[in-house]
Image: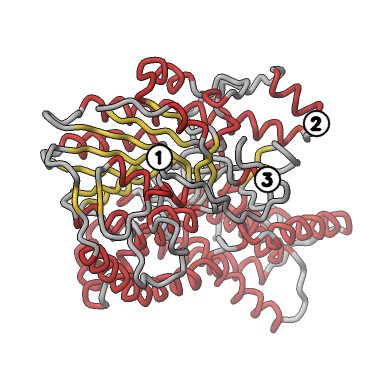
Amino acid sequence: MSPFKTFPVGIRAWIPVLFLSAACAAAIAAGHDGRRAWQMMLLALPVLLWLCWPVAGPAWRRVRAVVAFAALAGFLIDGALRAFLQHQYQAAPDSTLVLGAMANTSPRESVEYLSSQLPAMSAALLALLAALTLTGVAIHRATSAPVALSRPARLVLVGLLALCALAHLSKPWRRHHPLLFWPAWTQQVVDLRAAWGDQQLQRARLMRNAQAASPAVATDAPSTVVLVLGESVNRDNMSLYGYARPTTPELIALRAEERARLLTLRHAWSTQATTVASLAGLFSFGERDEDDPAGDTQHLLALARGAGYKVWWVSNHDDVAVDQQHARLADAVEMINRQPGRSSGSLDGELLDEVEQALADPAPRKLVVVHLLGAHPHYRLRMPPGEHPFDAGGDAVDAAMTRDGRAAWVREFRQDYDAAIRYHDRIVTETLRMTRRHLPAGGRAAWMFLSDHGQEVGHTLDHAGHSPGTASGYRIPALLWRSDAAFDAPAAARPFRADWAGWTLADLMRLRWSGMRDERNVLHVAYAWEPPALPVKGIVFER
């Protein structure tokens, strides 16, 4: 006799639904963390609630059973796949690592990989098969012995379904539903495989363009240059630039140490409000958009390699476009982040060991590009747990935002954003200290830091995030350092644009080639400022 028959009929009808709920929750918890797990449960809930709704017709019950099994099996398989990838590679399915591996794998290689992994996967596969079998049995029991619902219970059920409908209306949530995510993931792999051929041709064209320009270094002395790229950092939130909260104490202390050798460009601007577009402009000297073919344009990394620099790309991002358009032009690539999107908790401090290894390399000429995650939303994930020095609020910044009518939630985002800047300050400063420690014998070193774009966090309106329509989306920091000479003081007051940063970095590298434009190098006496065309009214570039 089944042990379930010892329960009263009313309770017995709920057991299959409770089992299915527990199995689904366990699969989601295995594959997702924190808030995302709760979002996934809301996406799974409609199927579980549907099993509770009385359906009279046997044909409709069969349809419901098939649909419910397909949906819940999707959540179980999704959780198992994500848990496996996280355990084996600390990577999400849509990370560059996984997408790249799939796009670069033939059917035969896939079979060989599965064969090699079968011993390690056998227990997990048996558990998954058992869970799917029990799910099918539970759905059959749930549909053959429906739960009896009173009128109030039905009203509660309708209310819960309405809440779940809102979850499905949110695209950032909905796209993670297994029945939507995995078909889209498959298409991503197909698209990436097709795009790789084009990108490889583009990179080959850029290398040929560089060789044709005959790049050379103006000195025979060893040279080390470090380019640090921040993410979503607004200079208005840096105490180095006069912000009221102490968000950059390390950079301020370093400026006191270095004096005229560390130059802070006070009026720095990005010409784009997104990462891919900004980096496309920066590395092409302002000559190329992110979707343009290579044509006759130059790429800074290709020129550096053509002149004899060994190039590193060390990144805390997981972005296929950045990887293919820029990183793969380097000699060595280290991508430590394998969790794409805003929910990645990878900290920039984890990059420092990779930077140290690059700087310790014996190559006489080194260019090290360090791409930080910076203050990219979600802000609270950009610093270690517990490092939230501005959560109490009640300071001058909070008072000013209150006076300007900013909403409480925006003020809380500003606290998180400023805490991210404070952590970012520590990492950026350490990259410069490391550069100083690895000064090449008989040579020189230089360092440059700037952000790809800014961020609006209640500066001019109730908004937190990327902002192409306000000046805050483009206001960035830019700092320069060199070991062998002080900077001219007037350079600090010159307006600066990130898509011309390549010309300045080339100056720090002592790089020359045919086609140089000194009027776009902020350090050159011939510098001639041209305001970029930004979609913001009344913008003043000299502030």
Q: Residue at x 73, y 39 (%)?
A: 460
Q: Nearer the viewer, residue 107 or 295?
A: 295
Q: In the figure, is residue 310 to the left or right of 381?
A: left
Q: Which residue is mark 3?
A: 539
Q: Residue at x 77, y 69 (%)?
A: 54
Task: Assign a secondary structure to mark 1.
Answer: loop
What percent of the width, then of the height, locates residue 260? 38, 22
Furthest residue toward front: 526
Q: Are marks 2 and 3 in contact (CB under 8 Å)?
A: no
Name the kind of residue labelled 3 in the image.
Ile
Name the kind of residue labelled 1 in the image.
Val
- Residue 111 in the image: above or below residue 364: below
Task: Assign a secondary structure to mark 2.
Answer: loop
Q: Nearer the viewer, residue 142 or 108?
A: 108
Check residue 525 in the rendering and tell me which mark sits there, or answer none: 1
Q: Is residue 118 visible?
A: no
Measured Cα–Cα span from mark 2 to mark 3: 20 Å
Callout 1 crowding tier (Cα within 10 Å): few <14, some 14–19, many ≥20: few
Q: Which residue is mark 2?
A: 404
Q: In the figure, is residue 148 to the left or right of 117?
A: right
- Does label 1 or label 2 sit earlier along the sequence? 2
